[in-house]
Amino acid sequence: MAKASHTRGTYNFSAGPAVLPEEVLREAQEALWDLDATGIGVLEHSHRGGAIDSVFAETEASCRRLAGIPDDYRVLFLQGGASLQFAMLPANFLADDGCADYLETGSWSKKAISEARHYGDVHVAASSADANFTYIPRAADIVYSERPSYVHVTSNNTIFGTQWSAEPPLPDGAWLACDASSDIFSRPLDMRRYGIVYAGAQKNLGPAGVTLVILREDLLERAVRELPTLLGYGIHAKNDSRYNTPPVFGIFVMGRVFQWLERQGGLEAMAQANEAKARLVYDAIDASPFFRGTAREDSRSLMNLTFRAPSEALEATFVADARKAGLDGLKGHRSVGGMRASLYNAFPDEGCEALVSFMREFESRHG
């Protein structure tokens, strides 16, 4: 597997918008000026012209190859981020007299629950709120409602640094909906386990402004209510994600990221690389009497590594000094504080090594 290149002098640990592969950025730079030798830049082409037809076709084909998406699933490129999907999903599939089961593991799942309650009953089948979302509930702790329309899970929790290691078991008759915004395509995905997977692009897939939605085709016939046109999945599927003018540039970059992931060896290779990167940093945290991880060890995210120092003052110093040393974006989310190192697919190995070295040096000065 080829390693992600890094020549810019600063390592970007931001939780999102996040680091992108440098070779993809170079391709995007060229396409801004001239897309595929058309003499017109990607930002200037009609979204219904032949050049953009090719962009859409190539992006979808790369996505399907990369993730092994079955033919009876639709691939959509939408807008509004995961936040719109929080409402769009129940608007389409949760009837007024229906119930959907949600697994509550952090801030984003709480927002999804809040939106779903506009449309029908929501049952929280499991929650880690009792420990400030520092763990993933065990299968034995999940108590489903009698006949949920679907079960919703947030696969990775960027703020609290936790991640589902596998899909939760489902009750008979329910299908799984997943907000995979912060770990999409960081590991193999068995699409047959899901009815719908959605993800904002700005962490592992591309720039902000595009939302990838992978939807089992038979669900398009199960919409439970009439909706404003742009809120229905069916209209987007019927019009190949171009009912309205789409974010063409973001879709172009996403397609190039899919191709980059294929060149790295695919999702199995990415899973191995992401495990190795995270292990390097977690080992440094665990070996230190100065730093401590915040997520329970069996629930730790490979994408967002959250940790604390002995005091908030030292944490502020750590973040400021790290930035001066070329390690940017390490401040934890404002709601929880501390530090957070986001190690998405395109984050290079040497950035993890630089962080560990800096942590040891900082501890020697302040420990």
Image (spheres, grey):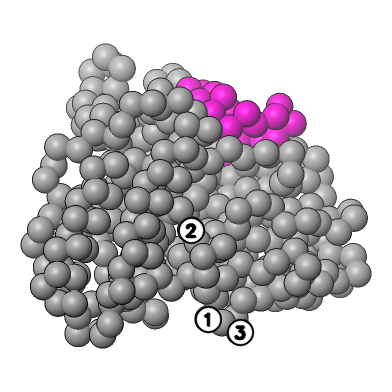
- Residue bearing mark 3: 130
Q: Nearer the viewer, residue 321 or 181?
A: 321
Real-space CA distance between mark 2 and mark 1, rounded to the nearest whole angstrom: 15 Å
Which span is picked out in magenta? 57-77
Pinpoint residue 139: horizontal percent, then vertical percent. Answer: 75, 64
Q: How many marks?
A: 3
* Magenta stretch: includes residue 137: no
Q: Which mark is residue 132?
A: 1
Circles 2 and 3: CB atoms closer than 8 Å: no
In the foreground, 159 or 32: 159
Q: Where is residue 110 in the image (x, y as percent from the top left)?
A: 58, 74
- Secondary element type, mark 2: loop
Task: Residue 301: give its label.
Answer: 2
Label whose residue precedes the other's in the sequence (2 or 3) = 3
Name the residue at 47% across, 38% down: 272
Q: Where is residue 162 in the image (x, y as percent from the top left)?
A: 51, 64
Mark 1 → mark 3, Cα distance in angstroms = 6 Å
What is the three-letter code of the residue carrying label 3?
Answer: Asp
Percent x, y of residue 226: 75, 58
